[in-house]
Amino acid sequence: MLRELYIENLAVIKQAAIPFSNHFNVFTGETGAGKSILINGLNAVLGRRASKDIVRAGCEKAVVSALFTELSDDTKAKLEEFGIDFDDDELHISREISADGGSTARINSKTASVGAIREIGATLIDIHGQHDGKILLHPESHIDIIDSFAGLQDSLAEYKGLFKELQDTARRLKKLAGDEHYKKGRLELLKSTAEQIGELGIEDENEDARLEEEYRLAKKSSEIIELLHKSEIALAGDENETGAGEIIGAISDKLAGYEEFSDFNSLSKRLENVGIELADICEELRSLRDKTALDEERYERISNRREQLHNIKRKFGGELKDVISLYEASLSEMNSIATGADEINRLAEIKNELLQRVTEKAEELSKSRKKASEELVLKITEELRFLDMPNVAFNIEHLPGKLTSGGMDLMQLLISVNAGEPPKPIAKIASGGELSRIMLAIKNVIAEKDQIPTLVFDEIDTGVSGRAAQKIGKKLLQASKIRQVLCVTHLSQIAAMADNHLLIEKNTESGTTVTTVRRLSADERKYEIARILSGENITETALKTAEEQLCVVEQL
């Protein structure tokens, strides 16, 4: 139950501490006194959007706090879910809204997120605002009423999770599939590139450099062979010519004949060493000549290979390392496309499985909605007849639709208020007063199913008067026997039903508008109800009527 609401610097309310009874609480006051501010305050403390514009002019912040007692099991479970301690079955929620747009929320004096108080607040209070009746004018919203009555929140959440998974899978599948024509052409290009490069069997990025060196060497091999041959003859000699090595050896031998002379002996040994070195050089010259021997087949192979590598570099650009990189990239992309095809098949299977599960879940929801609709029709019809609509015929149209995030049902509330007329869409025939009563009937019926302890009605009496207003008052009084009810009203028949009557007054202090909220005594209630009946000029007749209305309520 909401025990007390404290408001500070909220719009024209400077400060107000508002006490509530456990049963039927009403707010009355002149038009423009600030009744809607109370609803804004409740919305703020319940975690709903709070604009900085509601901060009283000239103040740094607005403060709204609420004290709740006799907590429901749902509220306690939600508090435990958020790890919030509570003692003595009490809960204190506060919200500070700064003039600069900031906001701070607290639960039992500890900082909490606005999301947390929103979820907890949903278990504490159900607010029916002035414009909620317009939901009835939008058929797409009617299914939410049926789901609330049927208690399908958990099933619907499970379905929506599956449906989102189906949507995500379908989007991924579409993205992977892409433009199949483009992918086919791209795959052909990659395959051609990979084949052209791959069939060359390139050893590494330096193969062309090595071939170029070998090619130049092979091309000049004949002149190199001739040079090596002449050098060998010059050093080693042949049958026609004495070589340098032989000449040096002869000189060394002759000098050795004078070994008794140290200088000659030294020269002889040096020349002997030179001879040995020349012999080694001759051996290397012969080896080089053998290696450099022109091999026509080898030369042709080198020439062809050199041409192949030159052409592949010219075709695909860059150096040989770039060609190799292109080859590897082509193979990788081909593999990716092939893997993508496997992924497409895998996702297609998942999509089909999800579609089957979503369809089955949607069918379960549909059956539950149909069953709940039958019971809902009976209960709402009973409520509406009590609310002075004796000839009402109420029905729910249930049509199959395509799979959406809400299921596969198209549901619309139909009504007829005149005997003999078939039910038609509410938007086409219901007046403002009828909309208010229909919404009250729906709220009462749904309240039987949920555990929310406090119901708030902001001008549920719009468009009604007389007997219908009295019936609404009786219905609210009846509801307050098992739930706490708060109601903002402008009708005396409803105000007279309350056990806690709160007056919202607007005054001027030092040139500034100030709104106050106070609880009325028994005598003050009579005068306020008389004011509602006759306006500012309260007549004896109005006072007598007010007294009669209060007496009638006491007898109920």
Image (cartoon, helix red, strand yellow):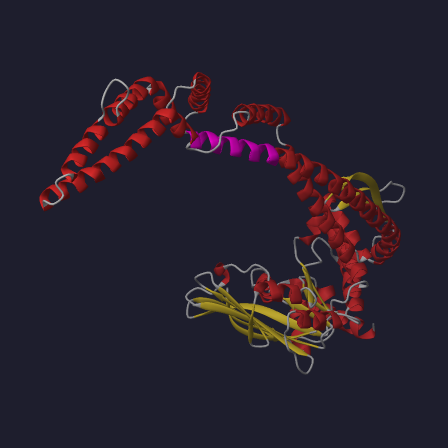
The answer to which image quadrant residue 34 occupies is bottom right
- Can residue 74 be seen by looking at this rendering? yes
Q: Is residue 535 above or below residue 65?
A: above
* Quarter of the N terminus within the rendering: bottom right
* Quarter of the C terminus within the rendering: bottom right
Tally the numbered discs. Answer: 0
- Which residue lies at the image location 66% right of the left edge and 82% below the top edge? 87
Instruction: Name the main secondary structure of what is drawn in magenta.
Output: helix
Q: Is residue 493 above or below residue 198?
A: below
In the image shown, does 119 or 310 lie closer to the viewer? 310
- Can residue 516 be seen by looking at this rendering? no
The answer to which image quadrant residue 234 occupies is top left
In the image shown, does 33 or 308 lie closer to the viewer? 308
Whole-percent x, y for residue 252 in the image: 17, 36
The answer to which image quadrant residue 245 occupies is top left
Whole-percent x, y for residue 3 in the image: 66, 76
Whole-percent x, y for residue 493 in the image: 74, 64
Q: Residue farthest to the bottom?
A: 88
**Position of residue 31 in the picture relative to residue 252 (left or right):** right
**Position of residue 16 in the picture relative to residue 542 (left or right):** left
Magenta-drawn segment:
320-336
Residue 311, magenta (yes or no): no
Whole-percent x, y for residue 373 in the image: 85, 50
- Which residue lies at the image location 52% right of the left edge and 28% below the top edge? 201
Q: Is residue 342 above or below residue 358?
A: above
**Position of residue 44 in the picture relative to residue 389 (left or right):** left
